[in-house]
Image (spheres, rainbow, N blue to C red):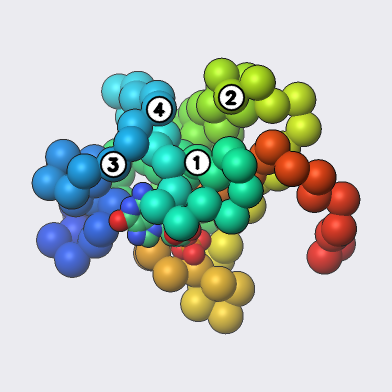
Amino acid sequence: MAGEPQSDCLFCKIVAGEIPATVVRKTERTLAFRDIAPKAPTHILVIPHVHYPNAAALAAAEPEIAGELLAEAGRVAEDEGLADYRLIFNTGAGAGQTIFHAHVHVLGGKPMTESMV
Ligand code: 5GP
Ligand code: ZN
């Protein structure tokens, strides 16, 4: 069934508590934890408990949870005292996605004025 936990998914294991993570926020439907290899002074991942391969698939299937993911990303940034921050959704291996469970990167705490867009 769509959204069901996948036994080979690292983030499903983090949601289940089978792999430890430094959790900063938890709601009924989302989890935010520090990235294991931070690319900025603040680097937090926000994920839904349900498993979808990327954020667009999550939004297509469960738009309310996708909205909650974004709202939680904002709350994480606020908790970290970030006025300026970047949200990144890598989608597909060719775009740098390595974990195929929907997630948004919250990055901040250093100037990030260089842009790809
Ligand atoms: P992606 O490249 O798929 O957009 O992002 C996956 C992120 O997950 C990477 O930034 C990577 O550092 C992070 N990551 C990979 N394995 C673990 C882990 O076991 N724990 C945590 N907290 N982060 C992880
Ligand atoms: Zn998963």
Question: From the Cβ of disc 2, is ligand 1 less than 8 Å away?
Answer: no
Structural distance between the alpha carbons of marks 1 and 2: 10 Å
| Mark 4 → mark 3, Cα distance in angstroms | 9 Å
33 horizontally vs 76: left or right: left
Give the residue number, with chain letter if any, for mark 1: 44
Q: Position of residue 114 (x, y in %)?
A: 86, 58
The amino acid type, in three-letter code, at marker 1 is Ile
The residue shown at (55%, 72%) is: 96
Q: Quadrant of the C terminus?
A: bottom right
Which element is circle 2 on?
Answer: loop
Tell me if mark 3 has few (under 14), some (14-19) or many (20+) residues whose alpha carbon lies within 10 angstroms of its own: some
Residue for badge 3: 21
Q: Earlier in the sequence, mark 1 or mark 2?
A: 1
The answer for how far apart the CA atoms under marks 2 and 4 are is: 10 Å
Q: Quadrant of residue 21?
A: top left
Q: Residues within 10 Å of mark 1 (few under 14, many from 20)?
A: many
In terms of sequence position, does the residue under pointer 2 or pointer 4 come before the other? Answer: 4
Residue at disc 3, secondary structure: loop
> Residue beneath label 4, please?
24
Labelled pair 1, 4 in contact (Cβ < 8 Å): yes
Residue drawn at (50%, 41%), measured in percent from left and top?
44
Tell me, yes or no, whether the two marked residues, 2 and 4, touch with CB atoms within 8 Å: no
Counting from the top left corner in percent of width and height, residue 80 is at 59, 24
Q: Residue furthest bottom?
A: 94
Marks 1/2 in contact by CB < 8 Å: the verdict is yes
Report if the beta carbon of the residue with label 3 is closer than 8 angstroms to ligand 1: yes
Q: Position of residue 95 (x, y in %)?
A: 60, 73
- The amino acid beneath tag 3 is Ala
Q: For marks 1 and 4, give the CA distance.
A: 8 Å
Neighbor class of circle 4 (other Cα within 10 Å; few <14, some 14-19, many 20+) is: some
Q: Residue 80, which numbered label? A: 2
On whether ligand 1 comes within 8 Å of the CB at mark 4, the answer is no
